[in-house]
Image: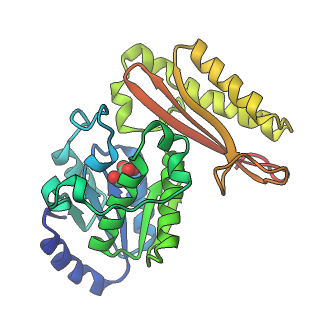
Amino acid sequence: MNTVQQVESLRAALAGLRREGPIAFVPTMGNLHDGHLALVREARRHADSVVVSIFVNPLQFGANEDLDSYPRTLREDQQALEAEGVALLFAPTVEVMYPVPLAQQTRVEVPGISGLYCGASRPGHFAGVATVVCKLFNMVQPDLAVFGKKDFQQLMVIRRMVRDLAMPVQVLGLDTVREADGLAMSSRNQYLLPQEREQAPLLYQTLRETAARISEGERDYEALAAAVCSKLAQAGFRPDYVEIVDSRTLLPPAPDSRHIVILAAAWLGAARLIDNIEISVGSSGEE
Ligand code: PAF
């Protein structure tokens, strides 16, 4: 596997790969776990070559967030990607990615959904994500790109950006990879203290129980979301939001909505955990 830091060397390496066939791309912030490796495996199923990027993107972190402490493990990540048969790793520095001061960087705004839920708690976050993903797409020019559904809202923002800007990239979403006890894999899980780690699966358990109630016909989504919040709060979480919305619009479900998603974010100690569960209503039950 070739690791490059500069855009020129990336483009030179890509020219060779492109002759071999379609290129799939997996953008990451590194500190790779099995969830990331599942994205890489999915990418390999769809293309001849897989390109991965590792870049901790300052533009998507708020002023008081964990940009400085975000785990950076490039050497281990390289070994894991090599073992997965990744052709090319792009690991730019901040100066390569943003040669102009961040305040002067052109940004990509996806209006509407970027201001909801995670976007309301983390102002500017999704503009930071959309901007870096847009730049990475322009640099790599992949045929397709794979993102995890754990970041459900992020996937939606990226799909909208690709649609609205007519980017020639197919975007695939992959189901969340979980630990044996159900906790969604995330680099931020390592911020949990041992006792918090034991409690953390309650988030997904509660979402599953609520999804089952919706599948059984309950439709008072506000009451259901409030019940999730209070159960989490009683267990020591600090819920940021719990929303039960139409998974196509991320807005409150209409009476005829068939595709529902429960989106949740909650703090447990120093970790902000996010998770979600999709439910099909009025047909075959939970997806
Ligand atoms: O999901 C992530 O790891 C990041 O938000 C992404 C998509 C790599 C953009 O920095």
Instruction: Quadrant for residue 2, please give it.
Output: bottom left
Q: Nearer the viewer, residue 226 or 214?
A: 226
Q: Is residue 18 visible?
A: yes
Residue pictured at 85% horizontal, 37% vertical:
216
Left or right: 269, with 79 as reference point:
right
Residue pictured at 66% horizontal, 52% vertical:
247
Residue pictured at 21% horizontal, 51% vertical:
79
> Colour mode?
rainbow
Left or right: 6, with 266 as reference point:
left
Q: Position of residue 221 (x, y in %)?
A: 76, 36
Q: Position of residue 34 (x, y in %)?
A: 39, 45
Q: Nearer the viewer, residue 221 or 285?
A: 221
Q: Position of residue 166 (x, y in %)?
A: 48, 77
Q: Is residue 149 visible?
A: no
Left or right: 214, with 264 as reference point:
right
Q: Position of residue 250 (x, y in %)?
A: 64, 50
Residue 171, placed above or below residue 243: below
Residue 273, placed above or below residue 278: above
Instruction: Quadrant for residue 82, please give it.
Output: bottom left
Residue that extends furthest to the front in the rendered view of this protein: 104
Question: How many badges with numbers are in the image?
Answer: 0
Residue 232, placed above or below residue 51: above
Q: Quadrant of the N terminus?
A: bottom left
Residue 255, placed above or below residue 63: below
Left or right: 223, with 208 as reference point:
right
Residue pictured at 62% horizontal, 28% vertical:
205
